[in-house]
Amino acid sequence: MSKTILITGASRGIGRSAAILAGQRGWSVGVNYVGNKAAADQVVNTIISAGGKAKAIQGDVAVEADVLSVFKQAAELGRLDGVVVNAGIVAPGSRLMDMDADRMRRIFEVNVLGAYLCAREAVRYLARSRGGNGGSIVLLSSAAARLGGPGEYVDYAGSKGAIDTLAIGLSKEVGPEGIRVNALRPGLIETDIHASGGQPDRAQRLGVTAPLGRAGTADEVGESIVWLLSDASSYVTGSILDVTGGR
Ligand code: NAP
């Protein structure tokens, strides 16, 4: 069945892969980004050239007015069936004792407040009691939520712990609305996020320590996201799926 979905942070990395894989299924895709318009346009063009429908939508998930506008524009593609709460950031590796408040504030604003605002809007659009048709919400957590990120980013790890808890609570709250909510914990995946944390080779370097002996690709996570959005996972809710090569 064709679907209309919104993916936050879909201009690059995992969100980009999920958007392109969804487009290949003939789904319409809202491609949110914050600053990199050229990359978002490239994702949209890839989907459109393959015969799909997509739209680039600018907005900072940490700003409530932006989130409202992003959802409004996405819903112009059609009635929403699914939302991937994917946009997330890290900061350069540091011990907690050396972190300043501005850094921690931004991590929690984007990764926690942003995710909760997007999940709230997703429920408002999908809930049967609000005229929606039910649907699927996929929240991007991280293996860091259970590993803790010591010496690098315990702030980021904590922000992802909040996402796991959101999946547990929200899935129970909105099951009766026909909405499934699941979290997905990627492990070491080759994307730009590691460069933004000052360690561009991090996934390659540490990937060999995973039981599967390598880092994962954005497409390998994207496939699991699309499955959680699809009707093939219709009885899966409140789950936290590790996509970590066993890490
Ligand atoms: P990435 O390659 O760094 O891409 C981040 C995406 O998020 C970009 O599209 C970026 O848009 C967007 N973004 C950043 N801040 C935003 C904001 N405030 N509002 C809206 N969009 C924003 O990241 P990734 O590796 O694909 O990670 C995606 C998700 O998976 C994140 O939640 C991350 O924590 C999680 N994750 C990743 C890994 C990994 O190893 N890669 C592991 C575990 C979990 P612009 O292009 O416009 O900047």
Image: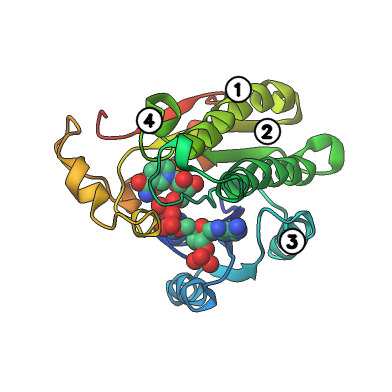
In this rendering, position of residue 63 left or right of residue 11: right
Label 4 – label 3 distance at C-alpha: 30 Å
Sequence-wise first label, 4 or 1: 1
Labelled disc at residue 66: 3
Mark number for residue 245?
none
Q: Tell whether 138 sits left or right of 117.
A: left
Q: Identify the secondary structure beneath mark 3.
A: helix
Distance Cα–Cα, label 2 vs label 3: 23 Å
Quadrant location, the C terminus: top left
- Please state which amino acid type lies under the numbered disc 4: Asp
Q: Residues within 10 Å of mark 2 (few under 14, many from 20)?
A: many
**What residue did someone put label 4 on?**
242
| Residue 153 vs residue 215, the one in the foreground | 153
Q: Is mark 2 within 8 Å of ligand 1?
A: no
Image position, residue 149 (x, y; %)? 39, 33
Residue 15: x %, y % from top left: 47, 55
